[in-house]
Amino acid sequence: METYGCQMNVNDSEVILRIMQDAGYALTDDIGQASVILANTCSIRDNAEQRIWGRIEQFRLHKRRRQGIVIGIVGCMAERLKDRLLESHTVDLVAGPDTYRRLPEMIRAITPDHPQIDVLLSRDETYADISPVRMDRNGVSAFISIMRGCNNACSYCVVPYTRGAERSRDPQSILREAHELADNGYREITLLGQNVDSYLWRDADGEVDFAGLLEMAAGVSPDVRIRFSTSHPKDISDAVIGTMAAHDNICRHIHLPVQSGSNAMLEKMRRKYTREWYLERVEKIRSVMPGCGISTDIIAGFCGETEQDHRDTLDLMEKVGFDSAFMFQYSERPGTLAARNYPDDVPPDVKTARLNEIIALQNRLSLESNRKDVGKRFRVLIDGISKRNGDEFCGRTSSNKVCVFSAPGYGIGDYAEVEVVSCTSATLLSELARD
Ligand code: 5AD
Ligand code: SF4
């Protein structure tokens, strides 16, 4: 089992693993031992797909060496490319994001002349009753998918085509999973969806929106922190911000992808907000929760982006002072509104130069944001050992910043009170706080 792409995909792999285990399969780390190789794929940007094509080439070698092994491509790229994947004559199985329940049955039906494909999208599949097999190894933080698909039509984005229409999952099944995690010692749960703010469940008992769900999740245990991702600037409500503020165990961090700081680009991207709207939302978040971390996604070089549009993005970044960001060059995705309507006309070297400028600015902003935390105290959940120094722990603040510190007598999964001593743009170097 290999996973590419976003956290949503990682969580899907955990669902697939439960389905496969229930059918009698076991996970192996050694691809040389595998009788079934499944790659859970991502289509969000072209380079993600290119990587997977390269990997399929390598699978071909395994197949030559060992007759009878099954090669399956599942997830977004399966959904997008469908039977084109079978033309490689390496792939035996193609399954889209809504057909994972059928994997064991499809695998059984494969013969050398009959590869299997199912890329039907569903309006109601949420895998609500399937408990994911946790593949994260720290046993401290886990993810719960609260919804699938996306009903927005951002013009650059392939997700609505690969993952289908938005559907929310029954809150009771989400809570059951959260309690199960808490009982198993997990201390941090991230609620996942393409657009969590539009979460909505209706049944005979009434309605639960995202603010309601957050409130319920916060009630699972005072020792379990709740995070969520991704918020949409057009939908994040005062009720959600208020619920965050009302609960200490809801982390003070919002991932709020802006994509661009130019109104012309936002319009063309069909994001349905303006830079002024975005800045107002940021102001609201900070007025209710001073110190709340805000991170973002930015796309450089979208169709028709002028130098001025790019300057507007840099200007917005400065105004907000993001704590961190994921930054990408625009890559045209076949079949999207942008691919159909707008030429991908920013030359590659200009895209690269703009992306580099955005990255350089974000590095400075991250450093400035971290410097403001030097001397402050934070409650940190220890989630691992520092990569640089095996004697030190790492963990995150509520605002999602990484702290490293030495804490004799503490262990992974403990909360520690730390004081920040110095920083880099990526890390708060800390020590245990003295009373
Ligand atoms: N090109 C570049 N970046 C993209 N993203 C989504 N689609 C594209 C694309 N075609 C980015 C957006 C989104 C993140 C998950 O990936 O910034 O928020
Ligand atoms: Fe794509 Fe927009 Fe949906 Fe995010 S909100 S998955 S960018 S269409």
Image: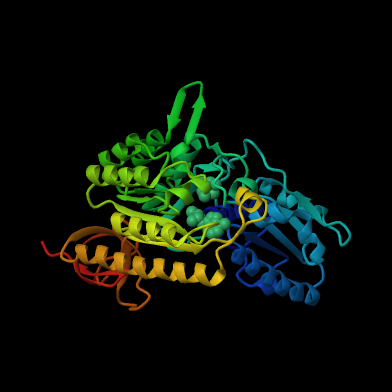
In the current view of this chain or complex, which residue is farthest to the top? 204
Query: Is 231 displayed left or right of 106 in the figure?
Result: left
Q: In the current view of this chain or complex, which residue is farthest to the left? A: 435
* Front-lying residue, 17 or 234: 234
Counting from the top left corner in percent of width and height, residue 70 is at 76, 63
What color scheme is it?
rainbow
How many numbered tags mark residues here? 0
Left of 68 or right of it: where is 357? left
Q: Is residue 32 above or below residue 139?
A: below
Q: Is residue 10 visible to us here? A: no
> At which x and y percent is residue 343?
62, 57
Q: Quadrant of residue 62?
A: bottom right
Residue at 43% x, 32% y is: 209
Q: Residue at x 36, y 42 (%)?
A: 277
Tell me where residue 81 appears, x and y as whole percent.
72, 56
Question: Can residue 60 be seen in this snapshot?
Answer: yes
In the visual, does 292 lie left or right of 101? Answer: left
Relative height, residue 52 to residue 304 (above, below): below
How far across and how far down the image is residue 162, in percent? 64, 49
Q: Quarter of the image for the N terminus: give it.
A: bottom right
Q: Quadrant of residue 92?
A: bottom right
What residue do we see at 30% from left, 42% from top? Answer: 244
The C terminus, quarter of image:
bottom left
